Structures are given as structure tokens and as C-alpha cells.
Image: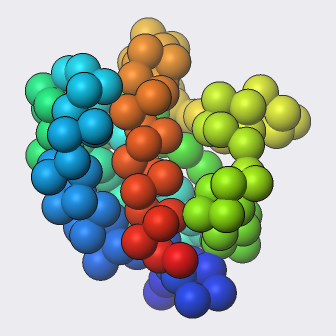
Amino acid sequence: MTARTGGASLDLKLLERTRVAVNGDPEFHRLGTSDVRMGLKAGDEAFIVDFVAFECAGVTAIDLDSLRDADFYLELTPDAWRNYLAGRAKGSAPSLVSLDVDAPNGIVKGSDPLKVLKFERYHLTLQSFLDTGAQLAA
């Protein structure tokens, strides 16, 4: 099952295309090194996105229980992901940081508070990754 986003979706194919795109983008590399394992949750679907040094090292579809292996994960409903990606592609959606602060219970989740802090440390890299995905999905 895939979280549909109008003509776009949050799925493994999009995440892999995004990985390839950011790894070939010098502007992405200028954001600096990252060492973070981010999970993405959309309803019953989940993904791990691994960042190592200056690149996105891999993307993997996982079962929901495996989100525990992420440093943290971003949780939105499939419709919210669709709207977020479409909004970012148009330049009208808030940043991940703003979205987390404005959501009643936040969107950044995790079991280890120290690992969850990696979101704040690497948010520019994570935002750039998702923005690239939003553009590819548009």
C-alpha cells in the first residue's frame, strides 16, 4: 500500500529517486555531514532513510515495529504526507521544524530522547532531502 499524494506518493520508489538526486547535488553536500537514521511513517507504511557523511546511504521499506531501529521518525497520516509534499513543491508548506512545533503532539517521534535530538541537529539535511522528493513527486 502506498500513501497517495495526488500525482505523487510517499513510497520506496520516490525515496530511492530522491536518494540518487541528493547524492548528485553539490548543494546537498554543502549542508555538511550527517549521521542519522530517520524513519518515515505514513499510516501502515514505514521507511528508513540512512544518512552517512555527505550522502544518503540508503532507503528501505520496513514494518512498523522496525521504526524502533531509527534514531527518530516523522509521523504523518498518508493524506498529511500528500499535502505536505505538494505544499513543499509549491513553496507553501511549513518547514519540518515548524510542522513539529505546530502539531499538537509533534511529528517527531522516538523512544530515545537523546537520539530524537538528532532531528534538530540535522533538520536542514532532512528538509533538503524531503524538499527534493517533493519536487520529484510534483
Query: Which residue is the extreme one toward the front?
Result: 26
Instruction: Locate residue 15, reporting x and y percent.
Output: 32, 65
Residue 101's place in the image compared with 27, above or below, is above
Residue name at image x 19 percent, y 40 percent: 26
How many numbered dots are placed on residues in this image? 0
Residue name at image x 57 percent, y 89 percent: 7
Along the line of sight, which residue is nearer the eye, 8 or 138? 138
Residue name at image x 41 percent, y 57 percent: 132
Residue 50 located left or right of residue 85: left
Along the line of sight, which residue is nearer the eye, 106 or 133? 133
Instruction: Locate residue 129, reporting x and y percent.
Output: 38, 48
Residue 121's place in the image compared with 46, above or below, is above
Instruction: Locate residue 28, reporting x and y percent.
Output: 28, 38
Q: What colouring does the structure picture have?
A: rainbow
Residue 128's place in the image compared with 24, above or below, is above
User: Which of the 4 image quadrants contains residue 92?
Assistant: bottom right
Instruction: Locate residue 36, reporting x and y percent.
Output: 28, 29
